[in-house]
Image (cartoon, rainbow, N blue to C red):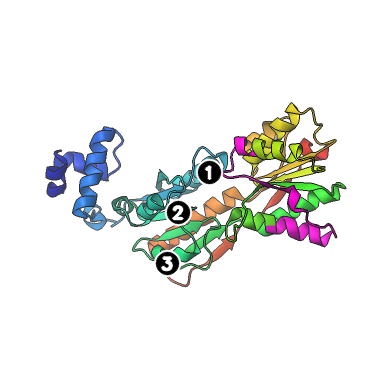
Amino acid sequence: MSDVAQLADVSVKTVSNVLSGYPHVRDTTRARVLDAVERLDYRLNVSARNLRSGRTRMIGLALPELRLPYFAELADSVILAAERRGLTVLIEQTNADRERELDVLHGPRRHLTDGLIFSPLALGQQDRELFKVDVPVVLLGERMFGGPIDHVTMDNVDAAQAATEHLIGLGRRRIAVIGAHEGEQVGTAALRVQGYAQALAAAGIELDPALLGEAGPWHRDTGAQAMRALLDSGTEIDAVFALNDMLGLGALHVLHERRIDVPGQIAVIGFDDVDEASYSSPPMSSVSPGRVQIAETAVDLLCARIAGSSAGEPVTVRADFEIVVRASTAG
């Protein structure tokens, strides 16, 4: 720690504050200390710092993008679950950047916590070996399956199939998807499109590629762009399945612009059941993917690994889902 302090030109106490997560440190000072930690390959000895328990009572939560309401609400659920177990959560945002995701797994900050709950987007199936780390990790999301760590995920295929079946049950046959990623084989978009396709096939409806609306990042603006493109193409549409609620809210905005009645002319359902979906106009139907269950299960699995009470093979848990029907499909 003295070497780190000397290289960063700060006091040993400042180094200690940075490594302990003390909030009242200037950003420039914190950056110098963390740079020195990385250059010296310094590793905090948590057991020495916490002689009685050998633990920090802190866990990490690494998410792609907190501006997306789903991830913000997931973080809230993880924090509440952790607090009930006497744990503090340190949150990191990766912006789906590969180097930042690697730093989450292998960087010096990892030793500030007892374990990590991690939702990667840049790392995937080909990176399974990188998840063999010396701290407990629980994986979230759909970028990797069958890895070396516990995994809590959504039932994306069945949930998307159920959402599409809900629209089919309303008599809709020209159901557009917003949020597809062309060529994606592994990931959330691919799994949800798979469920959509299964529902169409089961109902004897041929999948029309013209109804697959591409969208990059799943935000309101990309949902709006995809909705405009579908309408401008002249493709007949009587329903929209948005692969997340932000895309759905963007689609609703455009339908209002075009004076298209929802759900009279076009019904809309989203995915994630974020709070904002209840307050759109009209309130938007959505798939509730079991966010609280995901958070509680992830924290439980991580705590078991930290405590050493779970030493068996990695487990995969798929959360329960529910179709929440609101006025955007119910009329």
Q: Are marks 1 and 3 in contact (CB under 8 Å)?
A: no
The amino acid on which the numbered mark 3 sits, given as a three-letter code, is Ser
Residue 290, position as x, y percentages in the image: 62, 51
Most distant residue in the bottom direction? 312
Q: Nearer the viewer, mark 1 or mark 3?
A: 1
- Secondary structure type for disc 1: helix
The disc placed on residue 117 is 2
Residue 222 is labelled as none
Q: Nearer the viewer, residue 206 or 311?
A: 206
Residue 206 in magenta?
yes
* Nearest to the observer: residue 57 or residue 255: 255
Residue underneath mark 3: 309
Name the residue rendered at 53%, 56% in the picture: 297
* Magenta highlight range: 194-223
Q: Residue 205 sits in which quadrant?
A: bottom right
Q: Classify the position of the C terminus by image quarter.
A: top right
Give the residue number, with chain letter if any, for mark 1: 71
Which is more N-terminal, label 3 or label 2? Answer: 2
Separation of disc 2 and disc 3 at Cα? Answer: 18 Å
Residue 49 spot, x, y in % from top left: 23, 52
Within 10 Å of disc 2 (Cα), the crowding (few <14, some 14-19, many 20+) is many
Q: Is residue 244 left or right of residue 58?
A: right
- Visible residue check, residue 102: yes
Disc 3, SS:
loop
Mark 2 or mark 1, earlier in chain: 1
Task: Name the amino acid, label 2.
Answer: Ile
